[in-house]
Structures are given as C-alpha cells and as structure tokens.
Amino acid sequence: MTGEIRYNHRNRLMDLGARLQSATSDWQGPFFFIQMADCQFGMANRPHGFRQEVAWFGKAMEHCNRLKPAFVAVCGDLIDRPCDEAQTMALFKTAALLDKSIPLHLVCGNHDINDIPNMETLSWYREGFGTDMYAVQDRGCRLIVLNTATIYAPHNVALEVARQDEWLREEMAAARRDRPYHTIVFQHHPWYRYEAMEPDSTNNFPLQQRLMYLDLYVDSGVELVMAGHFHRNLYTHYRGMDMVASGPVGLSKYTDPTGLRIVKVYRNRIEHEYYGLDNVPERVTLEGE
C-alpha cells in the first residue's frame, strides 16, 4: 500500500488520534453513532473486482455525511483478502468520502489479517490501517476496540494475543475505576452465536475462553458488545450485557439487507436499530433527558 492513498489515510488516522486524546471525558448529553461491519471489499464478485462494495460503502458514507454521527465504527472484514493492495486502496478511497469531521474507527477482522494470522499479515494491517487495539474515554463513555481475529486463531501470534490480553485487563480495570456512563466494546467476532453456553463449534470461541472474556466484560461494567462476522443480525444477552452482531455493509448471506446500525446513547440507556441502505432515515432524533 503506497502513494497518496496511504499518505492521506495515515494523516486521517493521526488527526483521529489527536481528536480522541483531546476528547472530553464528561457527559455532554445524548448522542448517536453509526456501526457497520463486513464491507469486505472484493467479496461480492470474486475474483472480478469490488465495484459493488464501492457502491454499497459509498452509499453508507453518504448517509453518514447527512446524519452527522459522533463517529462511525466498522467492525472488521474491511477487505476480502489480506494484504491485497487494490482492495485496500478501493476501501480507503471510498472511506475518504466521509466528512473529515467524523471520526472513523476501523476494527480488525479475520479477512483483514487471514483466518490464521501471522506477524506478517498483522504488521501489514498495523502499517496501513493503524493500531488494532485501543481505548478512549469520550462523552462520558469508554470505547474499547479489540482484535478478536488473533484470539480466534492464535497459532502464529500467541505473544500478540498475550500482550493484547494484558492490555485489555488494564483497560477493564480503568473502566471499573473510572465508572463511565457506558462502556462499549467493538470487535469483529461475537464470542458466541446464539447462547453463551452453546457447544464449541467453528462459529464461536471455546466455552472456557468465551466465559473468561464475557465475565471480564460484565464484571468491568461493559454494557454493549458490537460485532459483525456473520453477515446477519444476531442479538444475544449475557448477565445483563447485550452482544450485537450487525448485518453487513457488504454482501449479505441471509435475509438481512446490506445496511448499517444507528446507536443512540443516553445517560441511562443505549438504543439501536439496523437499517437497510435503502431505508436509512433522513435524520436522527434524540429524546430529551
């Protein structure tokens, strides 16, 4: 990934980082953000380009520019094939349509670094997309971005998984100490598909491992986990915590349309709804407190 596209994207990431570090930690009143997942440039017409993903993601950017969310988060599988320069540059060009005043959070997925990632693919992602794990206190809320692709297949990146795990526990301790109004985690994989105690399968994490993370989240006050991966909408709960897998802003595999999720954040609750790209509202109205 070279040239002007990478340069412009890296500048945007640096600008985002500066805004996040200077973001207020105090509650400023209700706000909303937009979550998407699985734009997966190059999937719809393999191996014949990414014209369809450009159209879908571009339309999503138009909706975001009209609605003016506090930020946009895309929960992984940004491209279809790791280290693919053409797919990545098409993604960046389309993402550049987003108003520069709106922070864009990109989450790492398995298609971004391979189903079984290694240090080469992980380093490639970090060089082009930025860090794959970070947290910020903003508007009285704690936002945590996690790389579940390495946790799902740690074979070649065990040290990175251990480093992320240590970092995550420090962030969760900070959340318990600071007691934000809401703590929200953004990741690519949900920890499970339908029920927390469901049998181990290729569609979830091993039971002991998933319960470890789930209990850590709940005990640290996490209220909402936002993910993707399945290219469909799934809603589950664990000990009072909501876990949402959103449908794709790329190719849908089920009956849920290609679309995005609008998330409204109030002082005492979080509300969200998924919309197909042809049914996104003209404006978002927040209730008074």
Image (tube, rainbow, N blue to C red):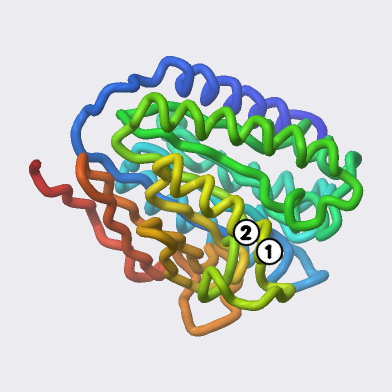
Residue 259: horizontal and vertical position, in percent?
A: 45, 66
Q: Nearer the viewer, residue 249 or 115?
A: 115
Q: Height in image: 258 above or below 158?
A: below
Which of the two discs, 2 and 1, labels the residue nearer the N terminus? 1
The amino acid on which the numbered mark 2 sits, given as a three-letter code, is: Arg
Q: Height in image: 286 above or below 11?
A: below
Residue at disc 2, secondary structure: helix
Residue 132: horizontal and vertical position, in percent?
A: 67, 38
Residue 91: horizontal and vertical position, in percent?
A: 65, 49
Badge 1 crowding class, 10 Å Cα cut-off, few under 14, some 14 to 19, many 20 or more, is: many
Quarter that holds the C terminus: top left
Tag 2 and tag 1, C-beta contact below 8 Å = yes
Q: Nearer the viewer, residue 188 or 191?
A: 191
For image coordinates 76% across by 49% down, the residue present is 150
Q: Height in image: 235 above or below 25?
A: below
Q: Nearer the viewer, residue 110 or 180?
A: 180
Q: Residue 77's quadrant in the figure?
A: bottom right
Q: Which residue is mark 2?
A: 210
